[in-house]
Amino acid sequence: MTDMLVAQRREQLLNELQASGGLKVIDLAARLGVSRATVRRDLLDLENEGKLSRVRGGAMLATTHDGAAPARAAVPAPRSAVVPDGPTVGLIVPSATYYYPRVVAGVQAVAAERGARVVITLSDYSGDSDAQRIAELAASGVSGLLVALPGGHDLPEKDLRDLEDLGLPFVLLERQPHDPFAACEFVASDHRQGAFAAVRHLAGLGHQKVALFTNGSPTAALLREGHRAALDNLGLDADVPVVDSGRPTLGSAEATQCYDQFLSACRDGGVRAALVHSDHDAIELLRRMRLQGLQAPKDLALIAYDDEIASLADVPLTAVAPPKHTLGEYAARLLLDRLAAPDPAAVPIRQMLLQPRLTIRSSCGTV
């Protein structure tokens, strides 16, 4: 019986990683309902079996859901694909455990096709040492940079000048320059469109009131803009809860209070539909609803934003999925095209916005 439980737990652990690309030990322990020590033992055994790779504080699958290799610190593209004296792409992203693993996998897939090497450095959402880390990448001999700074989707002019001063070609990932006329290449998800599509779907189900819950991430401001645009353009009621939790620790009393206050505001305002960023928050809202005798979609229809683990909720969540893997592929192509051009300066500046995809599941019902 014990062996069966261990096998089931490890299968569930792999399913969690399959959905997200990577998670921290603390998150895996919370999801599986076991101690962190148990999770660490499982990760070690599964790594020995070649099914995942441990990283600091968590783990990533040995391959992503679409077969591309995930990112680890300072990992090159597959050696067999690297061309001698070929370009080296420096990549900086805020996280290796949520959202960005699939972006990195897209970068690596194109790098392998082009015989390029990828070297990654991980930033964090404090942003305290980003300039130093980028400078270190540039000094290491990389040919160009792919950059996702953690501060927000709107890149400040100072950060843009710092990148330009390095003298290397670069492409922004999931970021755009604050100056809309800046001659800067970027590939980004159009999160405004993603939020608009979610609200439009709920409106099509008959909801005149659609609330918004965000978690203080850099994406929150864009989701608010898309949500507001949808309310205005679709003629929906604008007097609805719009709440940002400010990123409390998952599972904390502060987080629980935020969820309960949001649910109370929806109930008091006659709101029966909501867009929730992120998947983690939507899943926690489902749990709080269940404890209060509420059900989705009967009492509150939910759409999650990110679609990392939304399908694993007890009520599978309809979700908006930014095109993470494709974004990484396109960004790598932009940079490598420029590096391969006989006259890189003659290549036109390209700026790309990719529209997220809405995946319909059970959490918001049907028309």
Image: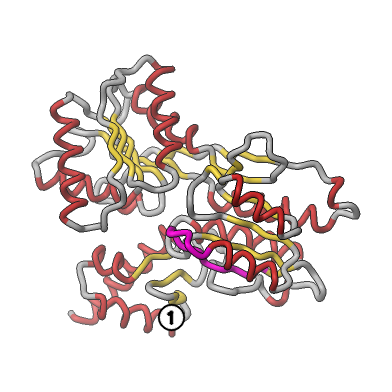
Closer to us: 61 or 128: 128
At 50% from the left and 61% from the top, the residue drawn is: 101
Q: Horizontal and vertical percent for residue 47?
A: 43, 80
Bounds of the magenta span? 118-129
Residue type pointed to by label 1 = Glu
Q: Tell me where residue 201 sits by quadrant.
A: top left
Closer to us: 333 or 357: 333
> What secondary structure is marked by label 1?
helix
Closer to us: 163 or 90: 163
> Which part of the image, by quadrant, shows the C terminus?
top left
Is 211 included in the stretch rendered in magenta?
A: no
At 43% from the left and 41% from the top, the residue drawn is: 320
Residue 180 at least partly seen: yes
Q: Horizontal and vertical percent for residue 244?
A: 30, 41
Q: Is residue 138 above or below residue 169?
A: below
Give the residue at mark 1.
47
> Which part of the image, by quadrant, shows the N terminus?
bottom left
Q: Horizontal and vertical percent for residue 113?
A: 73, 62
Q: Tell me where residue 292 sits by quadrant.
A: top left
Q: Is residue 214 above or below residue 35?
A: above
Classify mark 1: residues with Cα within 10 Å, few (<14), some (14-19) or many (20+).
some
Residue positioned most to the front:
158
Q: Horizontal and vertical percent for residue 207?
A: 29, 22
At 33% from the left and 68% from the top, the residue drawn is: 13
At 29% from the left and 69% from the top, the residue drawn is: 26
Left of 123 or right of it: where is 361? left
